[in-house]
Amino acid sequence: MVKLLITLFIISQCALADSTCSRVATINYQEVLVDAGSGNRGEGLRFYLEKDPESKKLLDEYQRRNKPTLWSAGASTTGSFLILASFLSTSDSADATTKNTMLYGGGLLVALSYLTSKTLRYSNEKYLQQSIDQYNKRNSPRIYFSPYKDNNGSSGVGLGVSRGF
């Protein structure tokens, strides 16, 4: 169980590192990094999107919703402490059920927190798309970007595995 959790964590971190740095938009036939520089996602498009007040408002909403929540941090921390406590507890026969409960409960809490935050981040991409659409309606040069597509041109969601459908 622990090896599976560690393997899933490593795979997801590799996929996250690859996708975070590689999001590009095309503006005037030039590629612009969408998540350039700072920790705010979408910040690379701010120069263009702040020309339109509605686009800027939607970009700010997108960045506000992308920040980590207190619930997510608390659930991940609590789950990690439960897993650590299960390893540090003594191995009495009466304590074995408590130890297993803490181990599986902590793993489930970490996994639930991770999946919830990934789902919220994915559903939040509509704000970035709306921001770009609002900008493209009234301004030029046009921004060509789809937050739901990867570099291969296929769309979809995967956990460390790229599949087109």
Image (tube, rainbow, N blue to C red):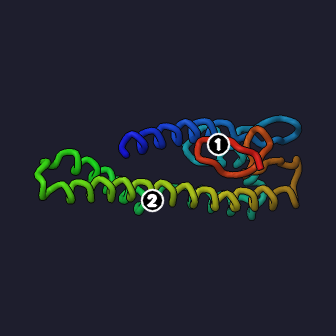
| Gap in angstroms between the C-alphas marked 2 and 1 | 26 Å
Q: Is residue 48 visible?
A: no
- Residue beneath the point at 75% across and 47% down: 149
Instruction: Return the residue nearer the eye: 100 or 164.
Output: 100
Of the two numbered discs 2 and 1 on the same chain, state the one appearing first in sequence: 1
- Who's the residue at 22% across and 45% down the image? 87
Q: Is residue 4 left or right of residue 132?
A: left
Image location of residue 97, percent across then percent down = 21, 59
Q: Observer-nearest residue: 35 or 22?
A: 22
Q: Which mark is residue 60?
A: none
- Mark closer to the observer (2, 1): 2
Answer with left or right where residue 104 lies relative to residue 139.
left
Q: Which residue is mark 1?
A: 35
State if disc 1 and disc 2 touch (CB < 8 Å): no
Q: Quadrant of residue 151?
A: top right
Q: Position of residue 165 (x, y in %)?
A: 77, 50
Residue at the front extreme of this rendering: 93
Q: Position of residue 10 (x, y in %)?
A: 48, 37
Q: Please, what secondary structure does the residue beneath circle 1 have?
A: loop
Q: Secondary structure at mark 2?
A: helix
The residue type indicated by label 2 comes to Leu
Density class for disc 1 (Cα within 10 Å; few <14, some 14-19, many ≥20) is many
- The residue shown at (37%, 46%) is 1
User: Residue 132: which quarter of the image?
Assistant: bottom right
Asked whether, in this view, residue 1 is left or right of residue 20, the answer is: left
> On the picture, is 131 further left or further right than 96?
right
- Checking the image for residue 112, the label placed there is 2
Tell me the kind of residue under disc 1. Asp
Query: Callout 2 environment at 10 Å: few (<14), some (14 to 19), or many (20+)?
Result: some
Residue sitting nearer the eye, 39 or 117:
117
Asked if one can make out residue 127 in the rendered structure from this viewpoint, the answer is: yes
